[in-house]
Amino acid sequence: MHAVPKPTPDLSSRAYWNGTIKMSLSKFFILRVLHDAPMHGYDIARTVERATNGCCSPSEGTIYPVLREFEEGGYVTFETEVVGGRERKVYTLTDKGRDALRVAIDAWMEITDALVHADKVVPRGETGQVDTCCP
């Protein structure tokens, strides 16, 4: 028996890069919006979507595993409230979560500087593709 080779990602595909970027940015922006106020999952997803002009739109399949990971790590806590007879968790950023956000901002700003420099070397638009994600 031979192992089935793993498909090689198409690095020239905008969809590949958008997916990779969105996956990483979703965690950052979840911390970011919780910095402003406690929220339940649906509100977190919609607030992230608005804050990123639709660039990052975390789905339920993405957001709840991240929130569980953040809770297990002590970055968020939650309280359960009942609204319309349904229970929902309202998440609050902890001090550890605020520290993590500060570290994340520093890391993302460092990479942003490197991206701005790369744009000067290879300006956007030379691929012939239109930028449809983030401004």
Image: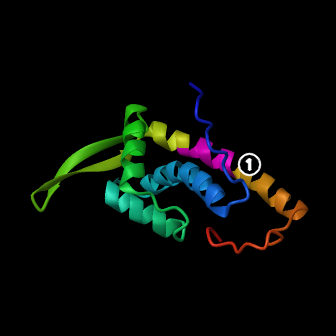
Q: Residues within 10 Å of mark 1 (few under 14, many from 20)?
A: few
Judge by depth and name the residue closer to the eye, 54 or 78.
Answer: 54
Judge whether residue 103 is colored magenta: yes
In the picture as drawn, the residue positioned furthest to the front comes out as 1
Q: Is residue 58 above or below residue 1?
A: below
Judge by depth and name the residue closer to the eye, 96 or 80.
Answer: 80
In the rendered image, residue 72, in percent from the top left (x then y), is placed at 38, 32
For label 1, the SS is: helix
In the picture as drawn, the residue positioned furthest to the left comes out as 85
Which residue does the image show at 12% across and 62% down from the upper left?
A: 84
In the rendered image, residue 107, in percent from the top left (x then y), is placed at 67, 45
Model colouring: rainbow
In the rendered image, residue 77, in percent from the top left (x then y), is placed at 33, 40
- What main secondary structure does the magenta stretch of the protein show? helix
Q: Which residue is mark 1?
A: 110
Judge by depth and name the residue closer to the eye, 96 or 45.
Answer: 45
In the rendered image, residue 57, in percent from the top left (x then y), is placed at 47, 62
Q: Quadrant of the C terminus?
A: bottom right
Along the horizontal axis of the image, is 6 left or right of 54? Answer: right
**Span highlighted in magenta in the image:** 101-108
Judge whether residue 107 is colored magenta: yes
Q: Is residue 113 above or below residue 132?
A: above
Which residue does the image show at 35% across and 61% down from the upper left?
A: 43
